[in-house]
Amino acid sequence: MRSLGQNHPVYSNLRRIEELVTTGARLTSQLLGFARGGKYEVQPTNINSLLEKSISIFSRTSKDIIIDKAMQNNIWGVEVDQGQIEQVFLNLFINARQAMPSGGRLYIKTENLHQSELEEEPFLLLPGNCVKISIADSGTGMDKKILERIFDPFFTTKGLGQGTGLGLSSAYGIIKNHGGYIVAQSQLGQGSSFTICLPVSDKEVQPIKETLEILMEGQETILVVDDEISVANVTKDMLQSLGYRVFVVRSGQEAVATYAENKDKINLIILDMIMPGMSGRQTFKSLLDINRNVKVILASGYSIEDKAQYLMESGCRGFFKNHLPSTFFPRRFMRRWIS
């Protein structure tokens, strides 16, 4: 798509392919969320900032919905995988939009709750203070029978091809996996509301990095380690088109040997986590033995909470899920990890 331009006859077909890939990636993420799969990159987060980002994305395509916000100042920090929690918010926003086909209002509120206040909530209690997020709409609402099943996997009231029934079940799995809870309340004709509570973290909150909407070109050398030849080749082509020099290897053993021979030339390593023989974890350990300051980004399409988190804490510079569509890659990828 970059090389052909928007006026090329096949550009619209390529755009459609991209949309289908994005849909497939979203479905995979929802399945992982429903299965309560591992968190990828957990960090202390200001939930107001993350909500604002999600609202900005949603509002671009929902001009007929008025959004009322009541964000508490000095909101406490929570420790979350920002990508997964953002997915929860967008799932709830999209669900609300579908309940308001002619437009309406979306009410979003955040507040700090002490343990003593939690005891007054008619929900599952958390063992300490929490941050509460409330998302309500003025839509059609649900009757009691539907409300009882909304978090069930594959349950949907939409027609064939219009929904997978995984949006709310994946939201439920993600919140539970973060040690929180999510509940829904609704009455037919009176809208719906969702309440999320997440445990408070005492760690210092990190600012949310803005996505760069430009292609980041460079001249550094990158080592790509992936046993899937199609993934490795596409990654190589994309990086080379941006000006980078690229080594490609298909195993951990090759990665260690190549880095040992070229460590003064290689600025960054993209390391697949799941490989036959020498795993990503073993490869990373061997790379550290060669250079304690080696710069590595983990890549995987699988849920690997313990392994990924261990390696992130051991010095990896970042993590991305390599089943995401290609537009994600050059825009968000390069400069901050190389430097």
Image (cartoon, grey):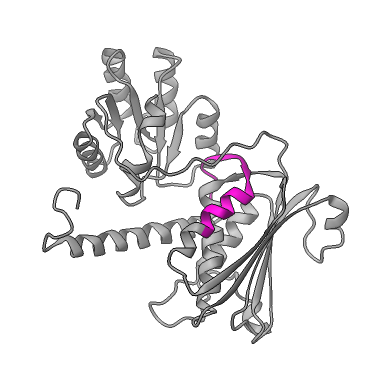
Instruction: Please identify the residue farthest to the left as the structure is shown.
Output: 9
Instruction: Give the residue at x 17% y 60%.
Output: 11
Q: Is residue 41 magenta?
A: yes
Q: Is residue 210 left or right of residue 123?
A: left
Q: Is residue 192 left or right of residue 12?
A: right
Q: Quadrant of the C terminus?
A: top left
Which sits in the foreground, 72 or 238?
72
Instruction: Give the residue at x 35% y 32%.
Output: 270
Which sits in the foreground, 209 or 253?
209
Q: Is residue 313 magenta?
A: no
Residue 148 picture location, percent across and down = 66, 77
Residue 177 picture location, percent across and down = 62, 51
Q: Quadrant of residue 181?
A: bottom right
Magenta part of the chain: 37-55
Q: Quadrant of residue 52?
A: bottom right
Q: Is residue 144 left or right of residue 31?
A: right
**Eyeballing the image, is 142 above or below 321?**
below
Q: Is residue 34 visible?
A: no
**Eyeballing the image, is 71 above or below 253?**
below
Residue 335 picture location, percent across and down = 37, 31
Residue 214 picture location, percent across and down = 32, 43
